[in-house]
Image (spheres, grey):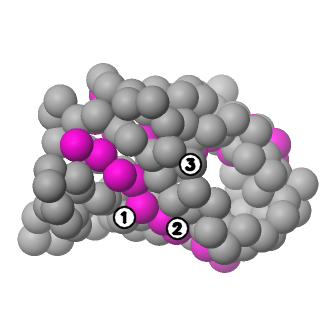
Amino acid sequence: MATLTYSDEITAKDASPGEKYNNISHLKTATFNYTTLGTETAASIVELVELPAGSTVLGFSMQWEDLGTSTGDVGVTSGGQELAAALALGTADDNYVNFVAPVAAALNKVYLEILTATADADKDISGVVFYI
């Protein structure tokens, strides 16, 4: 069974004053940061951001440290890959950017599914989601 964990922003959202986004011609951004626990198993789900109801995702940018042999999907559904499929999380990337055809965020969230287990703790995954 998949394990659901949360980014720092989801964990602290009740303690923070509002969402982190920038409104430029209706384009908004939501930032995220997740530090691996080292206990992530195959099919672990990380909720990266929560978006306002009715949001449409246009793309994202993500950076990560080397997570060993891990791969991952990014989507707007838990386990989805609407935004990216089979990212090579085992190779550090300091600026992965992917723009897609507009995707309605039906659940108002963006998720990362870690497809292969990682024993690497304290590795950072961070980025920004672009939405309207």
Name the residue beneath numbered marker 2.
126
Q: Mainly helix, strand or loop, the magenta region?
A: strand
Which element carries disc 1, helix, strand or loop?
A: strand
In the rendered picture of this protein, how many numbered marks are placed on residues?
3
The three-letter code of the residue at mark 1 reads: Thr
96 vs 71, left or right, is left
> What is the three-letter code of the residue carrying label 2?
Ser
Q: Are marks 1 and 2 in contact (CB under 8 Å)?
A: yes
Residue drawn at point x = 23 percent, y = 55 percent:
28
Q: Which mark lies nearer to you, 3 or 2?
A: 3
Q: x%, y% of residue 131? A: 29, 46
Which residue occupies the foreground of this view, 59 or 68? 59
The image quadrant of residue 43 is top right
Which region of the structure is painted magenta?
107-132
Task: From the image, tell me which residue sits under label 3.
Answer: 98
Q: Tell me the crowding category of disc 3: few under 14, some 14 to 19, or many 20 or more residues within 10 angstroms, Cα based.
A: some
Question: Pointer 1: what residue?
Answer: 31
Asked whether 22 falls inside the magenta stretch, the response is no
In-front residue for pair 52/8 = 52
